């Protein structure tokens, strides 16, 4: 193999070969898709990453697994650091998306006030939360993104509380763009990133990101699991423009959520109240459908 | 150069703003701000300044205020902020990383008592809590010194031989809210003093590097050593910056430590901040009556100016360290470093600690006279003396 060619090729990737991420890691797939979207758009970016698996991905100084400039921030700070970075970019007439790449711990929990403030100020940044529903980097503790019933090291008897609805929280800030993503739907993923690139101001994207280590699932099941989550309505894919208009990207096809739970060791199947889960999924989809009908998104947007 | 009657906070806000404006021909200026008594007027001043190439970001917390300033600094902009007391405690994580990122951010801190009990008055415990971070620390006694030191701090922090953030401190209300005559330099003078910032390790969109990521122990160790080497260069670079300051502004911003009547002094007071002003006046009076008493004002606290302090105490037999701060279970913080300074050099020196003005108490000339009376009566040093309160035998000895 021509080593020089491999090195050259790696320079062009957002996520370079040779990183130490787990097999079946949804975040890795997400980074690859983000890279593809950037490549298609011909855009450059800087990553701003708080404490999470995403910064471990970079590897050790002086090398980096990222083919773009990357700033490692403190856990709660990525949207605030990105605000400073984007400010200086804009003051100097430079181009390059400033993209926060953060886990659910940094988004739903410790960084929520920082994220809310950046959204309220409508900072000119893109914020992507790869949501694996667990503190993966510290070995699998509950976060407020962890769904009810999931066993984690800090909810050894299963989590009682349900998953926080971060999309609604972000939409309530009336930011220009909020969208949910799934690694099972790459075309939808890239289309939404392209939309995000074309908009100015605060853009929030929520990526359902499988974590075999935390979900106690098989790496080869990762994509299938999040596909089931979309198909059953557990993780709706939709867009919200200006917190006001809605568009559902992929309608659930009536798939039963049971299989999603059965294939993950973090759930005890007998503990999951499927009837209630089905009802919750149906109610949420209905609410989104009503919003998308009553307040349809402007079709002029990509 | 216009002289105006302004508060310490006004002087600080002015210095930060004109320093930021001076980088308009470079990559600009940006900062995160968040209010807290008694520094609020500083960030209000900054927020109202008409920057030509800059942005002030009102953040939702001190932690994020520093984060915004760091993001700007990482991109090569001039960046600063201000805070006090519990705000500094809340900001602490990002204060720490700003130093390790080697970002030349300048922060003005108004020293206020850490609560509880809630108290807005002067006490240096807030900034001294940050003493082990990779930051330079300066303590100023009046408005002019706040202004001059803040401007000088930018030049020093941004020097390639240093590249460390700097903290300029003043006492709550005594300095921050007291109006005095202050020379406010013109923008063109500041432009001449502060060249555009060129941060060598700034983030660039065409360079795939990670700033602040993982490093193995041997890499981390060499980065720590580089910080120590930069700290050791501070005295020399400070003098260069001071000379340049004199050339541009026609005024001496003062030395890192400022001695008064120490040449043949047998008893030396060591003080910082506004206490130094009061102590200097007492020393002046006592000198007039023939007593061999001197004063060292510590303006620079980090790096600790050990050599300069030892030089200034050559004739001394007794030293009183006045601390407006208290490290629980350990005593005054300036005292601890002073003792370490003399260990192995002057083990004969009697070094006594006086905790005075804690939690915003007044340090009057009477208090200084009491300290001198105690110092001269001693045959040996003992535990820190708590001034202004009756102490039990247990706490005294």
Image: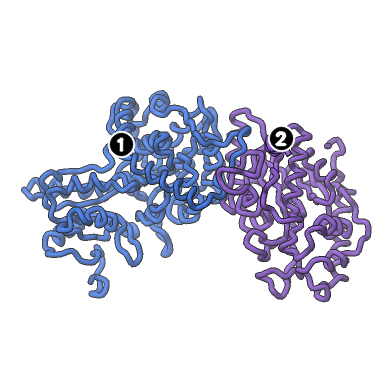
Quadrant assignment for the C terminus of chain A: top right
Q: Residue at 50% x, 44% y: name it.
A: B101
Q: Chain of mark 2?
A: A
Q: Chain of mark 1?
A: B
Q: Position of residue A95 (x, y in %)?
A: 66, 31
Closer-to-camera residue (A34/B19): A34
Residue found at the far right of this picture: A254
Q: Position of residue B63 (x, y in %)?
A: 53, 51
Secondary structure, mark 1, is: helix
Q: Is residue A167 left or right of residue B75?
A: right
Numbered label tally:
2
- CB within 8 Å, label 2 to label 1: no
Judging from the image, the colouring scheme is by chain
The image's mark for residue B236 is: 1
Question: What colour do you see for chain B?
Answer: blue
Q: Residues within 10 Å of mark 2 (few under 14, many from 20)?
A: few
Q: Is residue A115 above or below residue B187?
A: below
**Residue beneath disc 2:** A5
Q: Position of residue B392 (x, y in %)?
A: 25, 74
C-alpha span from label 2 to label 1: 49 Å
Q: Quadrant of residue B249?
A: top left
Question: What colour do you see for chain A?
Answer: purple
Q: Is residue B283 visible?
A: yes
Quadrant assignment for the N terminus of chain A: top right
Q: Is residue B43 above or below residue A56?
A: above
Q: Is residue A213 left or right of residue B255?
A: right
Q: Residues within 10 Å of mark 1 (few under 14, many from 20)?
A: few
Q: Position of residue A123 (x, y in %)?
A: 65, 41
Closer mark to the observer between disc 2 and disc 1: 2
Q: Quadrant of residue A132?
A: bottom right
Discs 2 and 1 carry the same chain letter: no
Q: Residue at 68% x, 35% y: name it.
A: A4
């Amino acid at each position: 193999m021509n080593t020089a060619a491999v090195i050259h090729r790696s320079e062009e990737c957002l996520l370079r070969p040779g990183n130490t991420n787990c097999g079946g890691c949804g975040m890795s797939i997400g980074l690859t898709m983000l890279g593809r979207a950037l490549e298609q758009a011909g855009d450059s970016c800087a990553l701003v990453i708080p404490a999470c698996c995403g910064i471990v991905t970079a590897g050790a100084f002086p090398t980096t697994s990222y083919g773009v400039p990357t700033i490692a921030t403190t856990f709660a700070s990525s949207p605030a650091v990105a605000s400073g970075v984007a400010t200086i970019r804009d003051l100097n007439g430079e181009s390059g998306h400033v993209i926060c790449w953060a886990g659910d711990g940094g988004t739903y929990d410790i960084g929520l006030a920082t994220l809310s403030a950046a959204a309220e100020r409508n900072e000119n940044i893109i914020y992507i939360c790869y949501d694996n529903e667990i503190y993966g980097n510290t070995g699998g503790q509950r976060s407020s993104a962890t769904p009810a019933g999931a066993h984690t090291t800090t909810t050894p008897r299963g989590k009682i509380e349900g998953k926080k609805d971060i999309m609604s929280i972000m939409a309530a800030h009336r930011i220009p763009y909020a969208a949910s993503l799934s690694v099972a739907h790459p075309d939808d993923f890239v289309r939404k990133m392209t939309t995000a690139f074309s908009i100015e101001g605060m853009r929030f994207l929520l990526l359902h990101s499988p974590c075999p280590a935390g979900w106690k699932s098989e790496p080869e099941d990762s994509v299938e699991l999040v596909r089931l989550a979309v198909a059953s309505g557990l993780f709706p894919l939709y867009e919200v423009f200006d917190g006001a208009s809605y568009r559902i990207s992929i309608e659930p096809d009536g798939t039963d959520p049971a299989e999603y739970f059965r294939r993950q060791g973090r759930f005890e199947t007998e503990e999951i109240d499927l009837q209630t889960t089905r009802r919750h999924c149906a109610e949420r989809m209905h609410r989104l459908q009503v919003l998308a009908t009553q307040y349809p998104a402007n079709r002029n947007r990509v | 150069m216009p002289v105006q009657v302004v508060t310490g906070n006004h002087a600080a806000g002015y210095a930060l703003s004109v320093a930021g404006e001076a980088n308009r021909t470079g990559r600009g200026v940006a900062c995160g701000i968040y209010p807290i008594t008694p520094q609020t007027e500083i960030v209000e001043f900054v927020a109202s300044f008409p920057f030509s190439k800059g942005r002030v970001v009102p953040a939702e917390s001190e932690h994020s205020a520093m984060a915004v300033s760091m993001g700007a600094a990482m991109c090569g902009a001039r960046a600063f902020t201000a805070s006090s007391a519990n705000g500094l405690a809340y900001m602490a994580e990002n204060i720490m990383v700003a130093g390790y990122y080697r970002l030349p951010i300048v922060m003005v801190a108004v020293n206020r008592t850490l609560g509880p009990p809630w108290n807005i008055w002067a006490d240096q415990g807030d900034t001294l809590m940050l003493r082990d971070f990779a930051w330079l620390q300066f303590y100023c006694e009046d408005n002019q010194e706040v202004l001059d030191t803040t401007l000088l701090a930018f030049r020093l922090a941004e020097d390639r031989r240093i590249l460390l953030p700097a903290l300029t401190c003043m006492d709550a209300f005594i300095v921050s809210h007291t109006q005095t005559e202050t020379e406010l330099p013109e923008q063109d003078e500041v432009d001449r003093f502060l060249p555009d910032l060129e941060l060598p390790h700034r983030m660039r969109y065409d360079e795939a590097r990670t700033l602040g990521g993982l490093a193995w122990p041997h890499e981390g160790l060499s980065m720590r050593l580089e910080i120590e080497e930069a700290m050791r260069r501070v005295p020399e670079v400070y003098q260069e910056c001071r000379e340049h300051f004199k050339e541009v502004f026609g005024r001496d911003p003062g030395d890192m430590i400022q001695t008064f009547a120490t040449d043949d002094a047998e008893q030396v007071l060591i003080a910082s901040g506004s206490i130094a002003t009061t102590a200097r006046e007492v020393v002046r009076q006592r000198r007039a009556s023939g007593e061999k008493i001197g004063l060292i004002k510590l303006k620079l606290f980090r790096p600790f100016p050990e050599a300069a302090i030892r030089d200034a105490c050559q004739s001394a037999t007794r030293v009183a360290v006045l601390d407006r701060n208290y490290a629980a279970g350990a005593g005054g913080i300036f005292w601890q470093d002073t003792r370490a300074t003399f260990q192995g050099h002057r083990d004969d020196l009697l070094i006594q600690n006086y905790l005075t003005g804690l939690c915003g108490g007044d340090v009057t000339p009477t208090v200084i006279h009491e300290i001198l009376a105690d110092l001269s009566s001693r045959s040996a040093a003992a535990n820190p003396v708590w001034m202004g309160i009756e102490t039990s035998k247990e706490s005294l000895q």
